[in-house]
Image: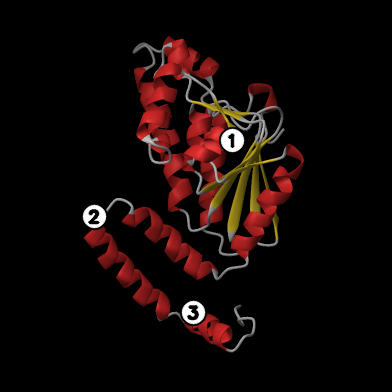
Amino acid sequence: MTILQRDDSNHIATLTMNAPERLNALSDAMLAALQSNLDAIAADSSVRAVILRGTGKAFCAGHDLKEMQAGRQAEDGGAAYFADLFARCATMMQRIQSMPQPVIAQVHGIATAAGCQLVATCDLALASDDTRFGVNGVNIGLFCSTPMVALTRNIPRKAAFEMLTTGRFINAREAQELGLINRAVHTDALSRETHELAQSIAGKLSSAVKVGKQAFYAQAQMTTADAYAYTGDVMVQNMLVDDTNEGINAFLEKRDPNWD
């Protein structure tokens, strides 16, 4: 069985986490497969959007606790393994935001701990209206410190802190209200609406989306003045692209742009 399946169609790559018996946990094998596939897609100019989803009852239940407990058998009690695990996970999460294509999480069932982190990390997220989200490690004595990084960059701090310190789950409607997901949809419509969103992105000028995604995350870390200076330069370079010139002319002439 392939732990992560990739299917490409109409410039959209769909990655399906396929370990339903483990609720698509971020095991060593799953992390390696995600990293490898994301790296490959990032270098593939034919792909313009990515959908990330899971099989079975859950989107992703976070780290594989059985593997983590096995890591304790090392002489150092697992310290080196845990450090490496969280570093590998952080690298994979950051790859999602550094790759040129927007990544859309298609979420169902549950997204907990590092699985909730994965949703928060993706550029966009749609969820079925019966999905539950949580950073509930505190319930077993493990504060979700690394998931907290992505979560606090998505939702208000007090809401994040409450989730982190109580282990409380939120439903899809609350996740939408807080900004963790773009919208909650009926279960039967989740796949269709996710693909429609991906198709909308894939239909845009890929070079503009690439530049825009990079600038989106870069400017968010800057002061307002620095952000305006940086994004002004980005727009100048974008304006000098031939396909952008064609797109503007097409709009003014009321026709479809002739993009390769």
Tell me where residue 144 appears, x and y as whole percent.
41, 24
Q: Is residue 231 left or right of residue 96?
A: left
Mark toward the viewer: 3 or 2: 2
Q: Residues within 10 Å of mark 2 (few under 14, many from 20)?
A: few
Q: Nearer the viewer, residue 72 or 179?
A: 179
Of the 4 image quadrants, the one containing the C terminus is bottom right
Looking at the image, do the residues carrying marks 3 and 2 touch, with CB atoms under 8 Å apart? no
Tell me where residue 192 appears, x and y as whole percent.
73, 50
Q: Is residue 183 left or right of residue 145?
A: right
Image mark for residue 223: 2
Q: Residue at x 72, y 46 (%)?
A: 191
Q: Would you name the residue on which mark 3 appears?
A: 244
Q: Label 3 amino acid?
A: Thr
Q: Would you name the residue on which mark 1 appears?
A: 173
Among numbered discs 1 and 2, the one appearing first in the sequence: 1
Q: Label 1 amino acid?
A: Arg
Q: How far, Cα to Cα, is label 1 from label 2?
A: 32 Å
Mark toward the viewer: 1 or 2: 1
Describe the element under mark 2 as helix, strand or loop.
loop
